[in-house]
Image (spheres, rainbow, N blue to C red):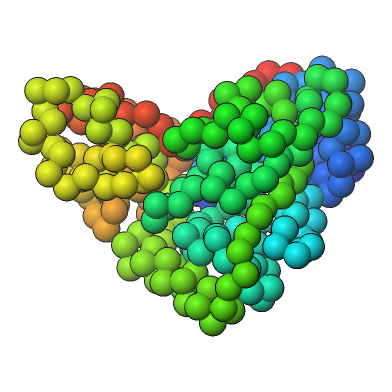
Amino acid sequence: MLQENVSLSAYASYKIGGPARFFWRAKTTSDIRRGLKEAKRLKAPLFILGGGTNLLIPDKGFGGFVLKPDVMTLTRRGNIVTAGAGVSISDLLEFTAKEALSGLEWAGGLPGTLGGAIRGNAGAFGGETKDSIVRVKSIDVRTGKIAVRKKNACRFNYRSSIFKERNGKEVIVEAVFSLKPGERKAIRAGIREKVEYRHSRHPLEYPNIGSIFKNVPVDEIPRSRRKELVRNVKTDPIPVIPTARLVSQAGLRGVSFGGAMISVKHPNFIVNVCEASAKDVVALMSLVKHEVRKKFSIRLTEEVELLHWEES
């Protein structure tokens, strides 16, 4: 059902952002198609909203049509699991643990929904979303046609996929995973270990949207700085230099602007400590990019998505 002037801060883990002029929550494939037709009828710019865990929404909101695909399919057939785009990663892991299926333990504590994880090929602890995927179903925004792609056709890359490359031209509906039988107790322990690590290392006590910038692949570091920076390479799953280390060495831990602050606990997080605005966060992002480039000759790339205001 179509809603108007819906606050987006309520759907964002940052608790930042103004209203959407139009809002449509879709629980089925048919709902998604109806929403796409409605957006066309209104001639409104379209934005597809996932879990809001990797997104900075402008203070004045979005003057277009926000479609939220909340497809909650979650079934098992043998070692095959089918999950809807709206399923949270935590619910997916709880399901696989209950079913004694192994392969997704690396995602313990990963925020957001499956649709967003697929789009950005989310990863941690050496694992990536693509690792266990068999195929992904999506809907073309323009035509409404369903596409089913096998893993190789999804063009998964470091924090990217064909869905991210196409930038809002498709709505992810569901994905099929191939997992392995495992011991329920060991699977739960593996998930819990990752969750506890995140709680100990990440500033989860404040509203945040995770790591702001991608880690820097070693082969993108200027040769003149490699000897200095590659002493402690991290596998993510490719060799990278953690951006948090670069931000820390640039002396930016704890720097604040307005209600936002570069985390002391994990400097690649910018946290909302006191009713921060999107402008506060953007100011700190610009500062980090400038200082890291000045000190290390490295251009940082955002891992988070910035939603830009659109007039409808």
Report the residue at 29% width, 34% height from top. Answer: 216
Q: Quadrant of residue 171?
A: top right
Left or right of 62, for residue 198: left
Which residue occupies the foreground of this view, 2 or 168? 168
Q: Is residue 68 left or right of residue 228?
A: right
What's the residue at 36%, 67% (across, down)? 197
Question: Position of 202 compared to 220: left or right?
Answer: right
The picture quadrant where one finds residue 213 is top left
Quick check: can you spot residue 270? no
Percent of width and height locating residue 302? 41, 32
Q: Position of residue 175 (x, y in %)?
A: 71, 47
List x then y, in percent, for residue 172: 72, 38
Residue sitting nearer the eye, 125 or 131: 131
41 above or below 226? above
Q: Which of these two is toward me, 305 or 284?
A: 305
Q: Residue at x 85, y 20 (%)?
A: 143
Q: Residue furthest bottom?
A: 185
User: How many discs mark residues in the rendered view?
Assistant: 0
Residue 72: give x, y in percent of width and height. Answer: 78, 56
Say which quadrant the N terminus sits in. top right
What is the quadrant of the C terminus in the image?
A: top right
In the shown orientation, is residue 11 left or right of residue 196? right
Q: Is residue 108 visible?
A: yes
Q: Residue at x 49, y 69 (%)?
A: 191
